[in-house]
Amino acid sequence: MSQLILIIIAVIIIGMISRISYKFWQYGRPQHLVTSQQPQTADDSAVTLFIPGYAGNRFSFGRMLQRFVMGKIANKSLVVWIDRHNHPHVTGHLDPYRPMVQLIFATPRVAVRAQAAGVLAVVKYLLAHEHVQTMNLVAHSMGGVVLFQYLTTAARLANLPEVRKVVTIGAPFNDSEVGQNTYPIENHPLTATGPTTTTPVYNYFLRTLQQLPNTISYLNIAGNIGDKFQSDGAVAMNSALSLRFLLRTTVNRYQEFVVHGKNARHSRLHENYEVDRQIIQFLYPNKIKTVDDEK
């Protein structure tokens, strides 16, 4: 009997390892829509880059991108692995219809500026090799800070692709530490004119975001699990939503959405179906079908 139990346990363990290995492979490869389509609008043609947060990997956006493909929303066209020298290694081909690009950093725990340089390297590759002219950017957690660092750098450069839409998810725009989680969670109240206390990253963006073109549209998503910090368990709502004060000049192109409940936890925001719906409706407003509501 004991031998049979050991065999059953071994089979279960092997099965779990096999499943994890398969998911690891699956979430790091391109996936295309079964039926190819041609773009009908500018939204359909824009290339969307997905930037993970601190210590992010293929699992960060892998499941979301798979849901978008399975829901017949868009193509996961390219997977770009960015090595420690910020050289992009590209897998896949760029679809003409709603192409999505997953970014994976070989060194995911480096500073914001280093990752932003990696994003810039990917954008230059897409411009040179795929002739990309318009882009959207989607980012989670510290990736949102990396995203805006890229935008401030790109604003000083010429002939880069136009950024049309930006989505940030649980991004710490007014935290002292934007990478690693800290406790207690920083929670600086917001007034009618901005945060009561500001951090270096907030002050930096307060100076630099005025350089951005006023043609970009923004969707800022925050989570609230109902804790005493009014946070997603890592980033306070007040920190994430402080972005509205950094984008005063484009307030008419800025919108925000707060997710509530246990599935609003920081590491679960990119697995939340309401977040899926918000992103899809923002990127592709003419798309009636969103995600599988039965899930």
Image (spheres, rainbow, N blue to C red):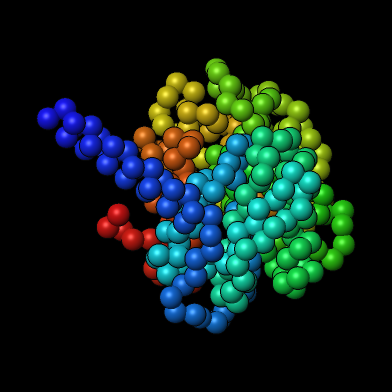
Residue 81 visible in image: yes
- The structure residue drawn at horizontal position 76% and vertical position 49%, both measured from the top left corner, is 86
- The structure residue drawn at horizontal position 38% and vertical position 48%, both measured from the top left corner, is 18
Q: Position of residue 39 (x, y in %)?
A: 57, 79
Q: Is residue 131 above or below residue 217?
A: below
Q: Position of residue 91 (x, y in %)?
A: 62, 63
Q: Is residue 47 above or below residue 192?
A: below
Residue 256 visible in image: no
- The structure residue drawn at horizontal position 60% and vertical position 45%, both measured from the top left corner, is 52
Q: Position of residue 260 (x, y in %)?
A: 40, 38
In terms of image quadrants, where is residue 145? Answer: top right
Q: Which sits in the foreground, 148 or 106?
A: 106
Q: Which sits in the foreground, 175 or 61?
A: 61
Q: Which sits in the foreground, 19 or 67?
A: 19
In terms of image quadrants, where is residue 97? Answer: bottom right
Residue at the limit of the structure toward the front, as seen here: 3
Q: Is residue 4 left or right of residue 102?
A: left
Residue at the limit of the structure toward the left, as seen here: 1
Where does the C terminus fall, quadrant-wise?
Answer: bottom left
- The structure residue drawn at horizontal position 87% and vertical position 53%, both measured from the top left corner, is 156
